[in-house]
Amino acid sequence: MAFFRTRLCLAGLAAAFLSQAQPPAPATPASNPPVALSSTAERVYDLAKPRILQIRTLLQSAGRQSSLGSGFLVAADGLAVTNYHVVSQYALDPKTYRLEYLAPDGEKGSLKLLAIDVPHDLAVVRVERSGLPFFEFDPRALSGRLPKGERIYAMGNPLDLGFTIIEGTYNGLVDKSYDERIHFSGAINAGMSGGPVAGSDGRIVGINVAKRLDGEQVGFLVPARFAAELVERARKGPALAVDKAREEVGRQLDGWQAAFYEALKKEGFRTSSYGPYRGLESAAPWVTCWASTNSDQIPKPRTAVNTTRCSSATGIFVSDRILTGRVDLSYAYYKAIDLNAFQFAKELSQRSAGRFRQHRRRAAPAAARDLVHACLSRVRRALQRDAPGPHPGSQPRGVARAAHDAGRLARQRGRSRPPLPRGDRMGAVMWIEVLSRHGEVAVRNRIEAPEARIGRAFDNDVVVDDPHVAPHHLRIFRGEDGELVAEDLGSLNGLYAEHGARRVTRLPLAGEPGIRIGRTTLRVHDAAHAVAPEKLLTPPRAHAAWAGGLVAALFLMLLGLQWMNLTAEPSANVLLLPLLGLATVLVLWTGVWAVLSRIFFGQARFALQLRIAATACVALVLWDQFAESASFALAWRDIAEYAGLGAWAVLAAACYGHLHAIGPRHMRAAMGLVIVLIAAGALLQYFGKSETRKLVGQRASLGDLRPPVFRAVPLASADDFFKRAEATKAKVDEARQKSPGGRGLLADFEPSE
């Protein structure tokens, strides 16, 4: 029985006392006759009261109780009996907990743990007092001669409400139980664990231990003879070394396990039929089997299921987190009624898992798109020479300028110009590009002079609106070899290569045309600069056509998978609701990326974003099916276990595609951040699964099952299975013997954690 913990909710307790038959007294109008208590129960309790104890487990650091139970004295020198599960916290972690008793007279004191019997859930402790009254064991109970139907009395301190006595009936030993337990028809509640159960003469016949939660007044007692044997062992010594209690628990579990398996072998096994198959069942009387079927299920099932479950109905309490000692065996026979092979495989997988508007606008002319972005304020404009005559110099703003006839100027030619280098007429032309903060060309200036000057002053050939640029910061000219050279004009912030970190005075631009002055990046090219080849233009509505085709293919694929995995009666809701949900998510996902594209690129490009998202969804579905099928075909759990890493890779590729569609220069930093976050998520999932695998092992099934025709490796034979089971057992036994720190079987289980 689970002992009382103060963190549990207290329930109301009604103690029932049976009345002894008395001659009816004359009724009086003034009062009702009193109900007499059982004189036997009263006598037994008066006798037992000084002999009962409340056993408390206290948390040493707080000095507060962590659990409560009961116990009783069995010797004048202070020996007392209780349940092992009442003192298990102290036994397994004596540095964190300590034991204390409370007597009915209010006396308190410490307890010493002398001996434990884990299989029978008993413990012997010593009260540091002597000359105390104590209980004796009933000889009839020790020899098993106590008759069924005898009235017996359970005592203890239920729910920390005070010491009570409960009258009940002795019903002998439980028939179908490997461990001997007495069936007690009476109320046993939390906090009474370890308390005495005595006969009418006050002698001990059993010890409170457990109750059935699914029944009424169905309790269980440990027979008195096991307590007597443990008391004798504690009296003879040696006393239990508390720091070695874990090893003692492990030794007792080993002994119980060996005897249990031997009893299973001795009772033998019998064959049972499950459809066309046969299986084994234990013939032991304490292994009970129950059968169930779904033939009466409404609506009519599409798979017939007949299940048999067998259990040894045993259990050993080791700690709050460990309950061992039970053997469970189950068989289930499945037969498809109107399912195809894929649907039937999905049915088995589910049962196994149960147990384990695009908006378009006209584009501006290409020349306008390639020049100035209105959002960029630092580049005012380029000042060009507008007359063939000599440079008039700087002029104040607002001064009227002479009108020129554009046609005449186009036909006129001024003074003769110097010969062009290398005989190339376009060789003297240079282009100076001012880049935006996103790395795109904001202004492209054509300079038809051998030299160009750059700065914030308005008499420059290129005016840059950057407070970190000098009024006359830089000049571009051709060197003796005809190549362009940038030269600093003595500015404060200097001249740098576009991607350089070292300040320079003069920089050749033949190899690296990019330069940086202040916070402005420039690129200088001559007319012979090679440009990238023409990019293929996607035909109008091509992205919309691709997106529509991919979405249709995705929905058809998912509809087919839904049909193959449908194990219940087909219905439009079952088939179409998941697709509607996916469509909603797909539209929301695409809409977010379209808004970002509209903000940073100037066009929403919804069809392109939808194409990318639909491609990623198709890839995810195909990857999931491939991973599950390969895991089943090769009987390789790791493929299904770590298939999520492939899904993370697909997500990363989709985000890369979305960001690249927005513009790689715009979103380079964001792209790197997204990829890093996705990689971190994938690694966290990987390591999380690895840690889970270390703690609880691999999952028992391969994931989603497939029809047998998908199997690529042969099934393991029964002999191979048992050989592997034997090898696994050997490894477990070896690991138990090599427990870290020498603390035994339970070294890895710390109750204080």
Image (cartoon, helix red, strand yellow):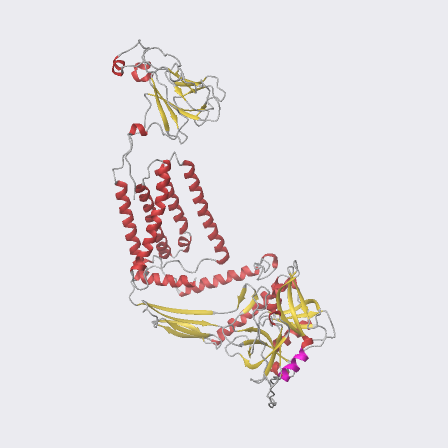
Q: Position of residue 668 (x, y in %)?
A: 41, 36
Q: Is residue 528 above or below residue 594?
A: above
Q: Is residue 622 visible?
A: no
Residue 590 is covered by the magenta coloring: no
Q: How many marks?
A: 0
Residue pictured at 41% horizontal, 23% vertical: 464
Q: Residue furthest right?
A: 131
Closer to the camera, 108 or 424? 108
Q: Is residue 180 above or below residue 543?
A: below
Give the side of residue 466 with respect to residue 410, left or right: right
Q: Quadrant of the C terminus?
A: bottom right
Q: Position of residue 557 (x, y in %)?
A: 29, 53
Residue 42 is covered by the magenta coloring: yes
Q: Quadrant of the N terminus?
A: bottom right
Give the side of residue 194 with respect to residue 361, left or right: right
Q: Main secondary structure of the magenta part?
A: helix
Read off the magenta span: 37-48
Closer to the camera, 574 or 207? 574
Q: Is residue 289 above or below residue 250?
A: below
Q: Residue furthest top?
A: 415
- Residue 660: image quadrant is top left
Closer to the camera, 521 or 566? 521
